[in-house]
Image (spheres, rainbow, N blue to C red):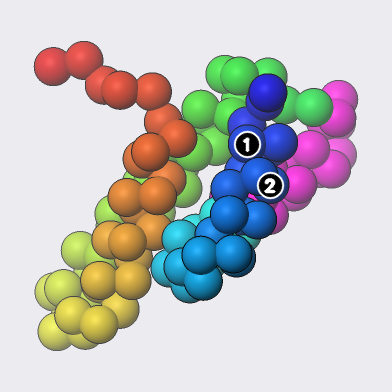
Amino acid sequence: MNLKQTIEADIKQAMLAKDKDRLRALRGIKSMILLAETEKGAQGELSEDAEVKLLTKAAKQRKDSAEMYEKNGRHDLAETEKAELEVINSYLPKQLN
């Protein structure tokens, strides 16, 4: 099962569980995958390497946004970004120390 299929199955589970934070993060990942698959020059399905790069980019964006929100005193928005970052990290391979 590739990442796109896994995300779609997890979206269904998040909908059934009414987990809004997880659902928002999963929909964001799915839209990034669809954009990457349909951009000019793409060959349809993404390779595993491309999927990891996409998720890494999304994780970095969430981390940077959370730091910026914290710095500006917007702790509510920072918590949202951190929740999405946790979901994204669950799909990334474990990093070596």
Q: How crowded is mark 1: few (under 14 residues within 10 Å), some or many (20 or more)?
A: few
| Quadrant in the rendering for residue 73 | bottom left
Tally of numbered tags: 2
Residue 79 placement, left or right of 10: left
Residue 5 placement, left or right of 75: right
Secondary structure under the numbered disc 1 in the rendered image:
helix
Q: How far apart are marks 1 and 2 (CA)?
A: 5 Å
Would you say residue 87 is visible in this rendering? yes
Secondary structure under the numbered disc 2 in the rendered image:
helix
Q: Which mark is residue 8?
A: 2
Taking 40 as reference, is 1 above or below it?
above
| Quadrant in the rendering for residue 6 | top right
Residue at 69% from the left image edge and 37% from the top image edge: 4
Q: CB under 8 Å between callouts 1 and 2?
A: yes
Q: Position of residue 34 (x, y in %)?
A: 75, 47
Taking 31 as reference, is 75 above or below it?
below
Task: Tell me where the magenta segment starts and ends, as one range.
Answer: 28-44
Magenta stretch: dominant SS? Answer: helix
Q: Where is residue 44 in the image (x, y as percent from the top left)?
A: 85, 30
Q: Nearer the viewer, residue 21 or 47?
A: 21
Q: Which amino acid does label 2 sit on?
A: Glu
Residue at 25% from the left image edge and 82% from the top image edge: 76
Which residue ends up furthest to the front in the rendered image? 16
Residue 82 placement, left or right of 17: left
Q: Does the stretch in magenta take in 38? A: yes
Q: Which residue is identified by label 1?
A: 6
Residue at 65% from the left image edge and 56% from the top image edge: 12
Q: Which mark is residue 86?
A: none
Q: Position of residue 11 (x, y in %)?
A: 62, 55
Residue at 40% from the left image edge and 49% from the top image edge: 87
Residue 79 placement, left or right of 92: left
Pick the quarter of the image with the C terminus. top left
